[in-house]
Amino acid sequence: MPVPIVDDFVSATVVDRFDDMLNPFGLTNHVAVAQVGHDVLAISSLNVPPVSQGECVTGRLYVGGRLAESFGQPVEHTWRPDRVTRATVIENWRIETITVLPPGAPGAVVRIEVTNEGGERELELGAWVDAQVVKSVPWRRAEPPRGYTVQERDGARRRARPASPPKGMAFHGSLEPTAQVTALQGLVDASGTGVDASDDDRIVAVRAVLGAGETWVGAFIVVVGDEGHDVASSFDALAADVDGAIAASEEMWNRELADLFTPGGDVTSGALPLLETSNDALRQLYWWGAMGVLWFRRENPAGVRSRHYDTLMPRYWQTTTFIWDHSLSSLVHALNDPEEMREQILHWIGLDINEHFGTEWLTGGPAGNWYSVNQYAMVRLVTDYVTVTGDAGFLDEPVDGGRTVGDHVREWALAWQDKRVGSPLADYGEIDNLLECVSTYVHEVASLNAANVWCMRTAAALSRRQGQPGGADELERLADELVPEILKLYRPGEGFFNARHPDGTLVPVRHCYDFSTVGTTIPQDLPGETRAEMVRFFVDHLRTPSWMRALSACDANAGFSVRPDHQWNGAYPAWPADSARAAIQLGGADAVAAWLPGLARTTRQGPPGQAHFVEEVVEPIEGGARKAPGQWPYLIDWACSSAGAWCELVIESIFGVHAHPDGTVTANPVLEYFDPTARLRGLRLGGVTYDVDADGVRAAAP
């Protein structure tokens, strides 16, 4: 079964009790996005940019006139790309729900079944409703905008409109005071008819007498929209066919999962290769990466382009694409959606990448501060686009006053020279420019200086392909001269690097970003003993049974923060994949093969989270590293778009495929450690379709 369906991504069943260390599941239909609440009914963060409710929670369940969470009963949550199912038992009422964001709908449907497991009695089921709906452009802060609203009865429904005048928090955007934004929500029965037995404007409720074993079926629906949208009609359409909305969600996600692997599909202009393997863990991680990128596709008509890829959802930065994270899924974008990738690259080139970390797609404007990785990330994006598509003419594309894309690549490759401060190496600034929660990982770091070597060598090769070989030899000479300076940061015998601070102090930092970036950009420049020591450090200090820690727990900076994306207690989702790539490049394929089954257990929680905890911190979920939660002090979103790094691990490291900047394609697979019979079919590079197996890469038979 080389093409997945939604059933292939069914999560572990996660049990949620009040205020557990749990990041509730998220949903999207590429227009709207939402996160389910901790109880069996609630929905939070339902936003359809530019219409937003921030992190507002609505639909909190009441049973018998009492808040359901107050009973303290556990709630079982299960995720698929198209739905979240939840179940609990309260006072012998078994309550089961299915939550979906139907295709194209600006809202959510929660199908409800309540079964009486006691004697005949009256069911009183209520939903506490809230809305903080506003319209705001742009969104340039982590938290989406939200505002104060007035709730009004609208028949059996509740309609919310902004307070007059609008009040709320738009942060770096602005509220639109004349926008007629609305949130409409309510309960319906199995026929789609609205029901409301509540006297409270903030609660909609149903009362029904049920005999033993009888079931009440209905739905909770919430829809948001602005002055250009008839929310009542949207509500009515969903209420009229709740089961149809659920079926349509499944059909949409199955269709789009298939499209990921279908050349000439209906949605994107490219396709990922099919993986044939008997190694279940290898297959699951590959599919995880592909689905994790698809989950972030946004096709919102309010965007400046027809399609974008968000970086975090469903809670933070909902309209922002970070250059760094996007580059970590670069190969997937180039293979699957090259037309969108081309547009995104040109858009970023048209702005000053020294002034932001990404762009906000409601306006196309910049967001945030400069990230030190930007130049490396942009070289990587352009290189993957050109080598995968074969569109070498892209390098001649004029941007901003006549300079070409190729000119920008050469400029980025040499940008490090302006960042030197009393040393041959570049100084990459302070904590907010780098990892944000590792205070010693600042200034002259091995990772990005090694990336400079790769950037210069890559720029040289692309220049020759562009027909501009002048300066290519000089780029390669500068790259070779920089390697010994980077190695001066290495700690012989220990497997990790120092960071050099402005006063010349060498500060040891046992971080995976040095390991993964040095190991994937300049492995061939490292002595054999150094490579072996680095792999040993990775195995002994970073790798855990089903995930990894970004920073060794033995590092002096481990006491600085508990933010688990870059600290000792967990890791960002691309770090295990990139560390596995580095380990293979450094000669540790056996260590990666032994790790794969544990990593695959972590895939059973939806797409990769912004961070997962290591096993010592929080109990794993069915053997997989648990996603970190969004609350203080962790502040972690449920999903992150760098999932494509897992596909790159499979294609470029385990199958060893290398699409060179000069247009040639080679493969150096290490399949003997994973599955000697595995095969990639339909890998399209430079206009040629290839198959790859343990014997290498060859053009596919017609």
Image: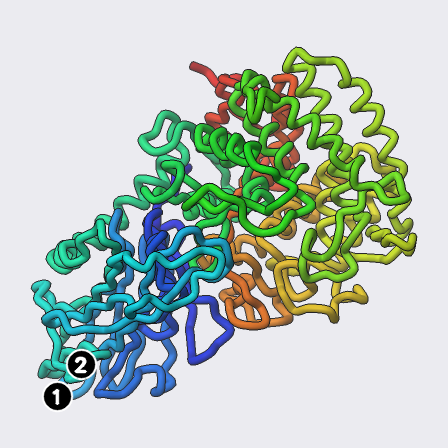
Pinpoint residue 670: horizontal percent, then vertical percent: 65, 35
Q: Is residue 469 visible?
A: yes
Pinpoint residue 165: horizontal percent, then vertical percent: 31, 67
- Residue drawn where x is 50% and y is 48% of the image: 641
Asked whether the beta carbons under mark 1 and mark 2 sit within 8 Å of each other, the answer is yes
Q: Could you say which disc has been placed on residue 397 in the image?
A: none
568 sits to left or right of 282 = right
Whether residue 127 is situated above or below residue 681 in the rendered picture? below
356 or 539, nearer to the observer:
356
Q: What residue type is labelled 1?
A: Arg
Q: Name the residue under label 2.
A: 116
Q: What residue type is labelled 2?
A: Asn
Q: Which of marks 1 and 2 is nearer the N terminus?
A: 2
Dot 2 crowding, Cα within 10 Å, few <14, some 14–19, many 20+: many
Q: Mark 1 points at which residue?
A: 121
Q: Quadrant of residue 43?
A: bottom left
Whether residue 534 is situated above or below residue 383 in the rendered picture? below
